[in-house]
Amino acid sequence: MCSSSNLEQRTAWTRERLSEALGESAVRLIATIAKHAHAEKVAIYLAGGVVRDLVLERENLDLDFVLEGDAIAFACKLARLYGGETERHIPFGTAKWKLNSATINNLSVGSGAIPAQIDFATARTEAYPAPAALPAVEPGLIAQDLLRRDFTVNALALRIEAGSCPWDMLDPSGGYNDILGKEIRVLHDRSFIDDPTRIFRAFRFASRFGFSIESSTADMMREAIPVIQRLSGERIRHELDLILREEYPERIISNLSALGIFAQIHDSFRTSVRSAEQFKRLREDMPQMCGSSDDIARVGWLLLFSDIAEDDALLICARLDLPRGLSNAIAGFARLMAKVDWLGAPGTKASAITRFLDGISATAWRAGLICNIDIHSVKERMELYMEVWRHRQPTINGNDLIRAGLRPGPIYREILDKLRSAWIDGEIESEDQERELFLKLVNEAE
Ligand code: CTP
């Protein structure tokens, strides 16, 4: 049961409190949207993650609105009035309103943070025609919309009234108390069977918020694990991608792995026992090297494959319908991992290492470095490759070859490669020595 002070907190979403949590500009934006909904006589709610995060006092400007009315028409109307683009998804009755700088000016909500895009959805009921299939949807009421959702903690909504505050919180499934009790709980027995992506989501939210998975929810989850096989590659890929963008992906990966979930995706999909330390290293060492969170998530994708040989990795990439660039990076990484002994062996020439690493992507050698940082010779050579060897080029170029009277053909590339290798291996150290070697190679070629 919730205490009276919880109830008070649950309903007292005053303007001041919202402004403190979301910022004044975002609250003005919400009020402007509410004014238009009111004029259209449509009930409008903020729902899902943003409301959960208000209760948790976590920053979140991901505004998801639910309307008991036509959300697509409403978003289009806002775009006509204020500018910006809409992206419509007719089968689900949803629309994304993308704001541009003119829209932000037209809205006159001040200079504080507001989201770059806002989601609108028509309140709906869902029916799942088969396990793991996409649902058939029908327009419905907000309570139905909340009760079709994944977890109680996400089944909360704030009713936004034009011009008046506080805004009431709707909580038909006890989500508020589950947030206070730090528990992830499904709303009905078939939730994971209907939509096994919720298995991934449960671990993602549990890890992010430090929640546990309520015990009967955990039982239902275990029963639904085989249904993961029926999910499309695209849907699993999306879930894994979201996991790799969390702060501690390794915790989620280890929980999924312990339940045999990777094996349900593909027989050969197994994560490394070292993945915890690898992800920790990625988080700590790589931001300077990689830069954006997209780059870090990309390296994270490769780390998921650190114990998998190239042939199997490619089968898993196909199962997950990964884009070609990412599959190629994963294949390159698998080749690198298979050559670690060779990379660290005393007799392996710097030029051979350079040729090999030139043939795989930067993402692959970044992941390779993370996984082999403890092997001194490999680490040293990979760092030399990144900092020095890969930038080495001969000063002699194609024009010098033409001037030397050589007929154009594959011999050009061969000579330039030999000159580059000689620089990388320290066999030549000056332009005079390079020219001497060049003349020798030209003579041999003639
Ligand atoms: N949802 C669901 N089942 C899913 C995916 C989503 O019921 N398989 C519902 C949840 O209620 C969720 C809402 O749709 O709150 C919006 O989905 P999403 O944006 O993925 O969830 P958020 O809770 O906003 O997640 P995040 O904080 O990671 O953005």
Image (cartoon, rainbow, N blue to C red):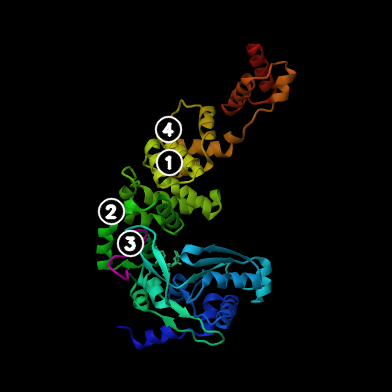
List x then y, in percent, for residue 312: 37, 39
- 1 or 3: mark nearer the eye: 3
**Mark 1: amino acid:** Asn
- 2 or 3: mark nearer the eye: 3
- 1 or 4: mark nearer the eye: 4
Residue tagged by mark 3?
194
Residue tagged by mark 4?
339
Distance from disc 4 to disc 2, alpha carbons, whole Å, reads 35 Å
- 4 or 2: mark nearer the eye: 2
Distance from disc 1 to disc 4, alpha carbons, whole Å, reads 11 Å
- The numbered mark, 1 or 4, whose residue comes first in the sequence reads 4
Residue 113 visible in the shown view: no
Return the residue nearer the eye: 195 or 58.
195
The numbered dot on residue 372 is 1
**Residue 399 picture quarter:** top right
Q: Secondary structure at mark 3?
A: helix
**Residue 210 picture quarter:** bottom left
Mark 4 neighbour class, 10 Å CA radius: few under 14, some 14 to 19, many 20 or more: few
